[in-house]
Amino acid sequence: MTDPNMTDKPMSDPPAELDREALAAASRAPVYRKVRRAEAIPGGTPTEKAPDPSLGGDPIAKERYTSTDFMRLEWERMWTKVWLLGGLESDVTEPGDYICTEIGRESVLLVRQKDGAMRAFYNVCLHRGNRLRAEGASSAESFKCQYHHWEYEIDGSFKRIPDLDTFPQGAPPCRGLVELPCDTWGGFVWFSLDKSVGPLREFLEPMPLHLDPYNFPKMALTRDITVEWECNWKASVDAFNESYHVQGIHPQLLYYLHDLDIQIDCYERHNRYLIPFGVVSPRVRKPPSIPDPIKTIMKGAGMDPADYDEPIENIRRDVQKQKRKVGPSQGKDYSRLNDDQLTDDYHYLIFPNVTLNVHADDLMLFRQRPHPTDPNRMFYDIWTLELVPDGQERPPRPRHQRFAYGDKSIGLVLDQDAQNLPGVQAGMQSKAFEGLWVGSQELRIRHFHKVLDDYVQGPGGA
């Protein structure tokens, strides 16, 4: 096995007079050259580095991952106050099409209306509290409760209440289903459990500016999976918002990406990092030939690795040039993307629970949802989408799969994370563990928890 602590150039024996402790400390940080960074293009995704926030270095308390009291505060002060991702617009194109989605203890219907608008309603019959629809996407002319056949129009209004004359109090005084705020952006449907929530675009800033150039609505869903994991939802958010763990959990990716040359940007609520793909990590020795993962990138761009005679460090640049050259003939418009976006992972967290691995030709979106009652469990949604070239039909929608951790594989990299997180959650229960000891490579984690605290404790921890 290759030593992950080795750099491209092995260190020679140090002079005896050097301070051994200082040398050992320096050797823990591999020496490397930064990759070339592309500049933003007009109307494209911003690339400038945001100033790092000053968030201190205190441990992050473990109780927020294990405590039912903190789970309750999260629900009351955060989950019920923010905008939440509900589903894909491509699932609700015609009047009566709906998505039933769940968050915590609540179930919500997102319904396409006759005028083309989207509306959201609590998924609960006002008679005896029965849920009207199961989780998933489908279509309906109305929503009829299967218990006593109370029926609602797709706009939520009462359609029929059997034997209404037997209710001395009459029908409930509301117009029908209880409505919630609903809006769309990026090819997705969003909702909030807070009727007084502000505008969606205001909550998302600056994400539309960053992500609109990718044109998500032109991407088609290729995988739709929900897995129940034995960990707190925040442990999953943490795992997918730092590259520090690549060396430990995903050693094969060290021959695919540069895990040390990461640009981290924190905004008001959301954050991102920019990670170069198509390069070899400085943690490993330079391979004698092109690694297989990088060959896959080259083949995807229409390049034959067998014909490539440039140094490995030039591959990323040449893949970018190739994709820029052949994109139009493939029906792919990259005009609003800079060169780095043709190879690299622009990786975003939309607070509180949407992680996006964004690429020129595809999107991997992870939605981390809390369990309704148990802080040690969560629901992990995997949506993968691929760009549909101009002139081609969208592929059929994949069926939704739902299973528990360990029942099926979700791919090598995600399996590695899934296998690790239950141990993280179990370890947090230990008396010996006081809290997360977070370093600068994990700045996004600290920023995420700061934003969470702004909701749970109030700005400044008040």
Image (cartoon, rainbow, N blue to C red):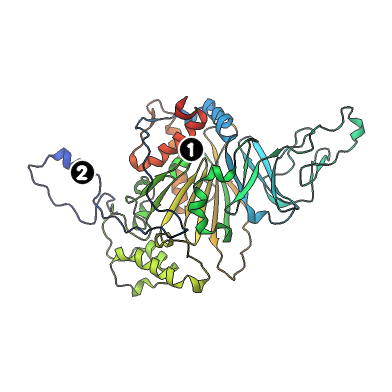
- Badge 2 marks a residue whose secondary structure is helix
Q: Is residue 167 above or below residue 412?
A: above
Instruction: Look at the image and tell me in which quarter the N terminus lies.
Output: bottom left
Residue drawn where x is 83% and y is 39% of the image: 150
Give x and y (percent) for residue 303.
40, 72
Classed neighbour count for the residue bearing mark 2: other residues with Cα under 10 Å, few (<14), some (14–19), many (≥20): few
Q: Is residue 346 above or below residue 311?
A: above
Residue 407, percent from left and from top: 55, 47
Residue type, numbered disc 2: Ala
Q: Is residue 201 left or right of residue 142?
A: left
* Distance between mark 1 and mark 2 Cα atoms: 32 Å
- Looking at the image, which residue is at 47% across and 31% down? 453
Q: Which mark is residue 150?
A: none
Label whose residue precedes the other's in the sequence (1 or 2)? 2
Q: Which mark is residue 26?
A: 2
Can residue 444 be seen here? The reply is yes
Q: Which residue is mark 1?
A: 234
Q: Does 55 sit left or right of 405 as displayed? A: left
| Near-viewer residue (423 or 384) | 384
- Is label 1 in contact with label 2 (beta carbons under 8 Å)? no
